[in-house]
Image: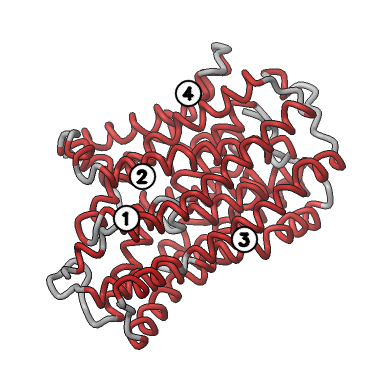
């Protein structure tokens, strides 16, 4: 049987459904738990929670669409079933998956995406991609409680310092990703700068004109606008 | 909710511990164990149904390459991201991936919409809601995307698909950076410089990310200690 047929047979879709089921149950449970504590002890109404969820939903549109576009490389090179199994709740982003599939192919003495890639390469990819990412989920299961304790220890209950840690770590993470793209120059540099300016402006504007709902849209709008500006710039240069 | 910034009152720590954190850890632990176990299903099914199992030498070589790439991130990601998204956020992010490009931006917007100060218990619950929404929406999106194969993406003009592939991620990085630069303007430029130097030196991501995160925290700590400067707070 052709490996491409096996790679899209029901077994892999079912495996994907089981994994996605666990991930969705977890998300649904935390969503309910967070909503309940905020409504019961935080003074939030269901309308407030709705606004929070809407903001997250709007923000997620761009990155999820981008994920789907990039994911097509995996759909074409391996199969839709494999892509669903790895990306439904796949621990790695699409980029990680592509790297891991290439690593597996190299391990099997083949080249990912080339004609030489066959059932052996595929079976290796199935094993390597799935098993190598257990480190993340197993690490979370075993060590998450300690992360909180470590943070408490460092901040010693000082709320203002906790705010410093949070804002600085976010700026550190995104500073890294932003600087990494800025280094590449051209449209990517433009996308980073435009994204930063538009998003900062929209968040500020929401406060100025007293329209808190604008914040739900701010990141989503900034992403699309910056992407478009970068496209125009790249086309013009 | 818009009044969160003035006279902010957080959830009582004991209540938060008992009614939120305890069930979060319990369900987080078991779902993460469950997903780890479920990762064995695909290779097992492939073997049971088709009798195909990758040769051990290929697995050994592939795993060695894959783990060289992944292992540093097993440690760096949770430690670096935890202050932003909290316990539930960590369980979800380490189960579903796509952290910096999807989970963190959704958590950041959720907190901005609520106008909640950073690093608080309310902030953690709100980030969890934002991330949970992104997970539920993301799984459905990916399912539709894979089921329809290239049909959905083929409906978009070529230039737009290319723009998404090339520029959406840099735009996300910039947008979240801009949002937080507003909350802590004093740290924005130093954060870029602290990340930029190891990048210019060509250090690997697993060195550069911790340098960027902890370097910026150290800078923030110094400003706090000696100048009593803290973030602006809230949305």
Task: Determine the chain carrying the residue at label 1.
Answer: A
Q: Which residue is mark 4?
A: A202
Q: Which residue is mark 1?
A: A83
Where residue A22 appears, x then y in whole percent? 53, 51
Do callouts 4 and 2 point to residues on the same chain? no
Q: Are marks 2 and 3 on the same chain?
A: no
Co-location on one chain, circles 4 and 1: yes
Q: Chain of mark 2?
A: B
Q: Quadrant of residue B138?
A: top left
Q: Is label 2 in a helix, a strand or a loop?
A: helix
| Front tag of 4 and 2 | 2
- The residue located at (57%, 43%) in the rendering is A27
User: How far apart, in angstroms, are the residues tagged by discs 1 and 2?
Assistant: 9 Å
Viewer-closest of A149 and B52: B52
- Label 4: which secondary element: helix
* Extreme residue toward the front, this view: B49
Using residue A123 as the reference point, say whether residue B187 is left or right of it: right
Spatial CA span between label 3 and label 4: 35 Å
Residue A58: give x, y in percent of width and height. 44, 29
Of the 4 image quadrants, the one containing the N terminus of chain A is bottom left
Foreground mark, 3 or 4, reads 3
- Residue B179 or residue B63, whichever sits in front: B63
Cβ–Cβ below 8 Å for labels 1 and 3?
A: no
Residue receiving disc 2: B142
Mark 4 or 1: in front is 1
At x 65% / y 53%, what residue is drawn? B28
Asked if badge 1 and badge 2 are on a common chain, one would say no
> How far from the left and from the top, in percent, is residue A152?
79, 53
Q: Residues within 10 Å of mark 1 (few under 14, many from 20)?
A: many
Spatial CA span between label 4 and label 2: 29 Å
Which residue is label 3 attached to?
A: A140
């Amino acid at each position: 049987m052709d490996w491409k047929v096996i790679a899209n047979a029901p077994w892999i879709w079912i495996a994907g459904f089981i994994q996605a089921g666990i991930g969705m149950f977890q998300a649904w449970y935390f969503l309910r738990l967070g909503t309940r504590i905020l409504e019961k002890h935080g003074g939030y109404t269901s309308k407030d929670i709705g606004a929070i969820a809407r903001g997250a939903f709007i923000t997620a549109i761009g990155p999820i669409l981008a994920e789907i576009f990039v994911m097509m490389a995996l759909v074409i090179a391996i199969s839709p079933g494999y892509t669903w199994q790895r990306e439904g709740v796949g621990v790695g982003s699409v980029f990680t998956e592509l790297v891991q599939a290439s690593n597996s192919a190299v391990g099997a003495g083949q080249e990912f995406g080339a004609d030489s890639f066959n059932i052996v390469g595929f079976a290796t990819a199935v094993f390597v991609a799935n098993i190598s990412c257990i480190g993340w989920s197993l690490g979370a299961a075993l060590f998450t409680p300690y992360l909180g304790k470590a943070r408490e220890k460092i901040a010693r209950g000082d709320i203002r310092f906790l705010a410093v840690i949070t804002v600085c770590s976010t700026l550190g993470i995104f500073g890294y990703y932003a600087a990494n793209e800025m280094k590449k120059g051209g449209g990517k540099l433009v996308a980073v700068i435009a994204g930063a300016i538009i998003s900062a402006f929209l968040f500020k504007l929401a406060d100025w004109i007293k329209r808190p709902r604008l914040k739900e849209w701010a990141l989503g709008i900034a992403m699309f606008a910056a992407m478009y500006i970068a496209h125009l710039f790249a086309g013009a240069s | 909710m818009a009044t969160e910034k003035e006279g902010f009152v957080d959830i009582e720590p004991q209540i938060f511990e008992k009614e939120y954190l305890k069930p979060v850890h319990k369900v987080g632990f078991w779902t993460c164990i469950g997903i780890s176990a479920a990762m064995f299903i695909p290779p097992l099914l492939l073997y049971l149904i088709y009798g195909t199992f990758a040769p051990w030498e290929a697995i050994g070589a592939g795993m060695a390459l894959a783990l060289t790439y992944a292992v540093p991130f097993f440690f760096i990601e949770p430690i670096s991201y935890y202050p932003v998204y909290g316990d539930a956020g960590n369980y979800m992010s380490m189960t579903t991936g796509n952290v910096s490009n999807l989970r963190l931006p959704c958590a950041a917007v959720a907190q901005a919409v609520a106008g909640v100060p950073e690093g608080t218990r309310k902030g953690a619950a709100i980030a969890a809601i934002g991330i949970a929404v992104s997970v539920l929406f993301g799984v459905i999106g990916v399912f539709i995307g894979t089921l329809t194969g290239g049909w959905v993406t083929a409906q978009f003009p070529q230039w737009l698909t290319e723009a998404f592939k090339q520029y959406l991620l840099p735009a996300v990085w910039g947008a979240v950076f801009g949002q937080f630069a507003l909350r802590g303007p004093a740290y924005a430029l130093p954060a870029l410089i602290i990340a930029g130097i190891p990048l210019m030196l060509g250090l690997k991501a697993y060195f550069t990310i911790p340098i960027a995160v902890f370097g910026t925290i150290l800078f923030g700590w110094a400003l706090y200690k000696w100048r009593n400067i803290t973030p602006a707070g809230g949305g």
